[in-house]
Amino acid sequence: MKAESIYTHKRIHPNGDIVEVKVWKVARSMDKPHGFKYSLAFIRGGKRVVGYDNAERKGDHRHYKDKEYPYTFEDVDKLFKDFFEDIRRFKNEG
């Protein structure tokens, strides 16, 4: 199965913050048992400060500031919710 883009969005805010979201439908595999490949990033000052992805052979995980954490993928809607909640949390922390 060829990867099929199901969502792509990039927004550059007036303050320079960037939100970039990409989601593809892919064949189910060991590292993508749910059939999705994704990359979501919030960039501030040229540095990714929040990110969710499932890079090849790394499985589902999230980045928050300078740390990487496991992530349990449930569905695309929850992925978006969790990502934008982390952005809100980051902004509130100052």
Image: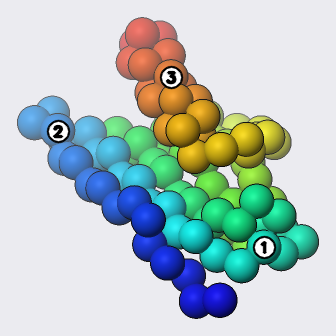
Quarter of the figure with the N terminus: bottom right
User: Where does residue 35 sit, x and y in percent of width and height?
Assistant: 71, 66
Depth check, mark 3 against mark 1: the one in front is: 1
Q: Residues within 10 Å of mark 1 (few under 14, many from 20)?
A: few
Q: How is the image coloured?
A: rainbow
Residue at the limit of the structure toward the left, as seen here: 14
In the image, residue 86 above or below residue 71: above
Q: Which residue is mark 1?
A: 28
* Whether residue 81 can be seen here: yes
The residue lying at 41 percent from left, 54 percent from top is 21
The residue lying at 34 percent from left, 39 percent from top is 44
The residue lying at 36 percent from left, 53 percent from top is 20
Depth check, mark 2 against mark 1: the one in front is: 1
Query: Which mark is first along the chain, 1 or 2?
Result: 2
Q: Which residue is mark 2?
A: 13
Quarter of the figure with the C terminus: top left
Query: Which mark is first along the chain, 1 or 3?
Result: 1
User: Could you say whether the residue bearing mark 2 is in a helix, strand or loop?
Assistant: loop
